[in-house]
Amino acid sequence: MSSTRWLSWSLPIAALACNLCGCRALNQAPDSAQPSQPASAPPATASKKAPVPGTVLYLHPWVEPREHAFTILLPAGWIAEGGVLRIDPRLGPTNSVGAKIDFSVKKDHAGSVMIHWLPNFTYKDPRALRGMFRVGSNYMGSMVYPLLDPQAFMDQYAFRKQRPQAQNVRILERQPLAELAQRYRQRSAVPNAHYDAGSLTVVYDEGGVRYKEKLMAVIENIAGPGLGMWTNHDTLAVRAPEAEFDRSAPLLSVIETSLKGNPAWVAGENRGAAARAHNALQTQRYLQDQRRQMVDRQRQVNAEARHSSWLFLTGQDDYVNPHTGEVEQGSNEFKNRWVNSGGDVIYSNNPEYDPSWDTNLAGRSDYKLSPLRKR
């Protein structure tokens, strides 16, 4: 893993307070199943000992409800909102060619601890229109808005739009993400495209709580005569109460890196986006060529896109699912990872923990250890 990591996931899972992460300790069953305890548990032996409370995190798969586009692992009691977003093509072709993702996971309805994946939109720089369209107007489905660098986009647009009630806002850090921008440049096939990436850390008051929030974005700028198009990519916001932000980081890392796209949906979306782009942009052929290449990248919500965008930013590794044989991404903050045939995952830092002896898993005994993918 690269030494460059957007969020410093450094705390062991044992440091998480259960009232913060929403998970259950081993002496409690998950909310989804509360089996009665047997009269007597199997005796601990030298090779198999009873699990130690506070070292196990239970996660359950959640499927995007609108189009089954992706899955993510959530602790019991957490809330998922949003998913696939479609823009009305009557507004213009630029942002309606392909689906977008606007999705958040929350500890509670207030979003006191949350991760928000913001949608990517393409904007039109008014300088390319020579003053013929005012800022905020619609041009071919794009909002007319001046080009912003990543920190300005997050500060002046994304954060202000998402947190209109924020007060006493103070910026703690502006950090460039040169490695992420370089990765975009290396895989880009768009002529005249320039990339800049960065993160922004802020603190603010909202609803009587002092929050800390970290945002990240990549800005793609397509320069050239008559173009002036720019797009935000990989825009993510993570927040928690300021006093709990560092303590919640390991759990948020596990959730974030578990996002996995549905390959069938991705393939169908790519075919549909290409067809829509071809039909919608016959009147502006050059824009069609640009957007078709951009859509290919925008639609990558699957594991491969997470590799190129997040693997070097967050602590994760490739695991082989022993039930399906598929390669899955998961946190590397834990010594062991188990998965059952239903997709439930258990992480543990206790080398002596064994799910077969876990009395909280009655009726779910087919957990198998997930080995690391051989390189």
Image (cartoon, helix red, strand yellow):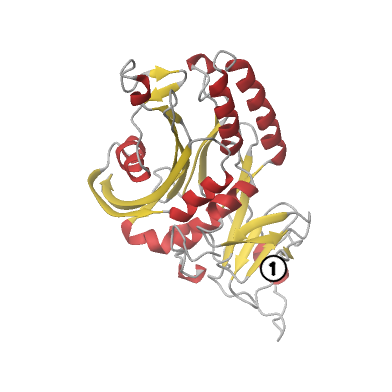
Q: Is residue 342 left or right of residue 351?
A: right
Q: How crowded is mark 1: few (under 14 residues within 10 Å), some or many (20 or more)?
A: many
Q: Which of 18 and 197 is in front in this view?
A: 197
Q: Nearer the viewer, residue 259 or 154?
A: 154
List the residue tagged with mark 1.
355
Could one spot residue 73 in this view of the protein?
Answer: no
Q: Which of 261 and 306 is in front in this view?
A: 306
Residue 97 position within the rendered picture, expressed as x and y whole percent measured from the top left? 57, 24
Quarter of the image for the C terminus: give it.
bottom right
Check disc 1 and give the amino acid type: Pro
Query: Which x, y percent locates residue 247?
Result: 41, 64
Q: Which residue lies furthest to the bottom in this view?
A: 46
Above or below, comparing residue 200 to residue 358 in the picture: above
Helix, strand or loop for disc 1: helix
Image quadrant where residue 165 sits: top left
> Please, is residue 89 above or below residue 308 in the view?
above
Extreme front residue here? 225
Residue 356 percent location from the top left of the image: 73, 69
Q: How many labels does the image show?
A: 1
The answer to whether 204 appears left or right of 125 in the picture is left
| The image quarter in which residue 217 lies | top left
Residue 269 showing in the rendered view: yes
- Is 294 situated above or below 114? above
Q: Quadrant of the N terminus?
A: bottom right
What x and y, as percent, mark residue 186? 56, 48
